[in-house]
Amino acid sequence: MDAPRVVSKGLDDVVVGQSRISYVGGETGELVYRGFDVRSLVPGVPYESVVHLLLHGDPPTSDPAPEERAALAAARRLPDATLRVADALPANLPPLEAMRTLLSLVGDGTFGYPPTLGEGYRLIGAAPVLLARYVRRARGLAPVAGRDDLGHAANYLWMLTGAEPDAARVAALEGYLDLLADHGMNASTFALTVAISTQSDLVSAAVAALGTLKGPVHGGAPSRVSEMLDAIGAADRADAWIAERLGRREVLFGFGHRAYKTEDPRAVVLHAIARRVADPARLKLAEEVERRALAALRAARPKARLFTNVEYYSAVVLEAVGLPPELFTPTFAVARTAGWAAHALEQAGDNRLIRPDVEYVGPPSGRVWPRPVGPDAR
Amino acid sequence: MDAPRVVSKGLDDVVVGQSRISYVGGETGELVYRGFDVRSLVPGVPYESVVHLLLHGDPPTSDPAPEERAALAAARRLPDATLRVADALPANLPPLEAMRTLLSLVGDGTFGYPPTLGEGYRLIGAAPVLLARYVRRARGLAPVAGRDDLGHAANYLWMLTGAEPDAARVAALEGYLDLLADHGMNASTFALTVAISTQSDLVSAAVAALGTLKGPVHGGAPSRVSEMLDAIGAADRADAWIAERLGRREVLFGFGHRAYKTEDPRAVVLHAIARRVADPARLKLAEEVERRALAALRAARPKARLFTNVEYYSAVVLEAVGLPPELFTPTFAVARTAGWAAHALEQAGDNRLIRPDVEYVGPPSGRVWPRPVGPDAR
């Protein structure tokens, strides 16, 4: 009862435990999955193999990982009862509002505690299927059935568009999914961990994570990068636009990160991917705006160590893949289901209820209700 | 970067901030809402007035609080689109699985950031309406429309049963709802706070909270108390049943709490409520089992300071109110929506992203993928 009590509103300096899953090197600009620097995996390693790595701890015997390839394909087939509810959702919801309900629907009472690998595959496999189905319905289009001959990334594009996915776009999307698959104890993964700490199930925990990812401070911002690029329109208008925005003390989306005090390695790799697939004019605009924004931000806050964050080139890559901005954050969630599953399994393996304290600073006890109280007072 | 780093897997000794909402006195056996000891409020203060107290900080001008009475009644009327989805849910889901989706449905894209009082009322008012509708459909019964002339507790019973609620049962349920309305920074409220910390919306945060409440270590256990009493059946079988259970090193539900090292004040008040409404034989069995269980637990672990927790007499009271065990945890969630709304508003008033760290103990960086990787490797 007399243990030292640490006050930390953002928990910045608090370590909630140990993890073998991923390492975020904020000072060195590294993101490591189970010992593999993501820059050595992307582009090229299939998402299924990254899922295998995150969930099992080692690379699969071949690429794409056979176990995950089969399990994720099987998870695309959802019960009719689930699809009926998905198809009853109002078609005009923001995709993340819909996705919260869609992920919840995956939990049909068969997800238990402790979470299992198989449950992880069901979550990861079902998420893009339900999302693609919803998005098509919102556009007045018939659903497209999943295809067992396609990998996770290709099948997502296929189910969204109903068109044979272009190999370059699939590779770009796969790189994005790989890079966003996990990121240490980020806020959504932490919400999932809190849920698992009460011995709740994987779907409930993943829905908690999604509800947390939805906030613009976490995952809800990438579409705003596209909006910014659209608003600027041409490189020669960038300086004025940025200056006006900073003059109003507004945030420039796509720059700065709580963890990274140097280049975000995901931004670097996504920039390289963007060079391969993005429309050259859009890429040039993005690079020019990036250069000028960083210059303006650093002039305004010389000590802040601000760098381009993952959201910036995520937007450019996802645009090039053909996704509309409103799908950027849902697609981030699709990627992150892998990390969520891995962290849920890890937490359950050495679990303890996460229950911090707060300092009560309200009125002292002893206030008296202004009217008579009691079982017979009314 | 060189701040002291605190490692605490359960965050037991970590204070995540200040709160003016409620105080949990683990050593003194107190629960205080905004300066009011709950033992001075229950039974007698209407749930609407407790909602007012938690959200505004002071008692309302009259009981039941007029603003909350009107707002919660208005929130009972839900859009047809929401009800259509609710009615499309499979009828055989565990109620908490259904409730996660039902709460998510309340979020129709109009809940924003920061959360508002009005959004809080919508959440609190809609939760029992959707739950009651689902439960009736699962039983093959037509929905019952809400009644503006009934308070929150009475209307919940009315919508569940379609029968004029008995005053003693309403009072007992209202006492339960009051007592469970908030409880410091419990795990579900913490999950909600993490979600709000990313500037997510109230419904997303409440769904995160529900997913966390669902775990048996937090809210998922009260029905097991009823199952235990049913399994024991008669007081003279209690000692043998308890001894066998403890001999298998299994948990006795309804005893012990992370926070309380003395009597849980809610258990004391719920016991008093149970004396007023419970079937005398059931009450006597519960009291006898409690006495013998505490004796056995204290003999087995003399230093553990184990006491009856809130779940024990919650079960006896909710049984007496007429609720089936599978509705105990959902009804706990119905009560707790008030605290969730209060904490969401408070966190948004002084917000900061909650993002703790983990210590990476996986393989060091530098592992090499066993096959060629790169954009053209496949």
Image: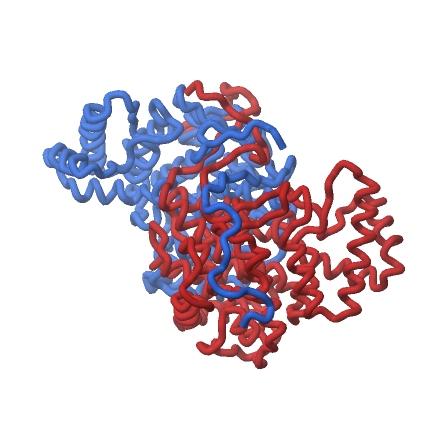
Chain colours: A blue, B red
Foreground residue among A142 and B32: B32
Foreground residue among A122 and A304: A304
Q: Is residue A40 visible?
A: no
Residue at position x 69%, y 69% from top? B276
Residue at position x 30%, y 40% from top? A315
Residue at position x 59%, y 53% from top? B214
Residue at position x 35%, y 33% from top? A310
Foreground residue among B42 and B333: B42
The answer to whether residue A24 is above or below residue A322 is above
Q: Is residue B152 visible?
A: yes
Residue B176: x and y in percent read 60, 62
Residue B272: x and y in percent read 68, 62
Q: Quadrant of residue A349?
A: top right
Left or right of residue A279, residue A272 in this image: right
The answer to whether residue A363 is above or below residue A295 is below
Residue A189: x and y in percent read 49, 39
Residue A201: x and y in percent read 59, 49
Foreground residue among A45 and A166: A45
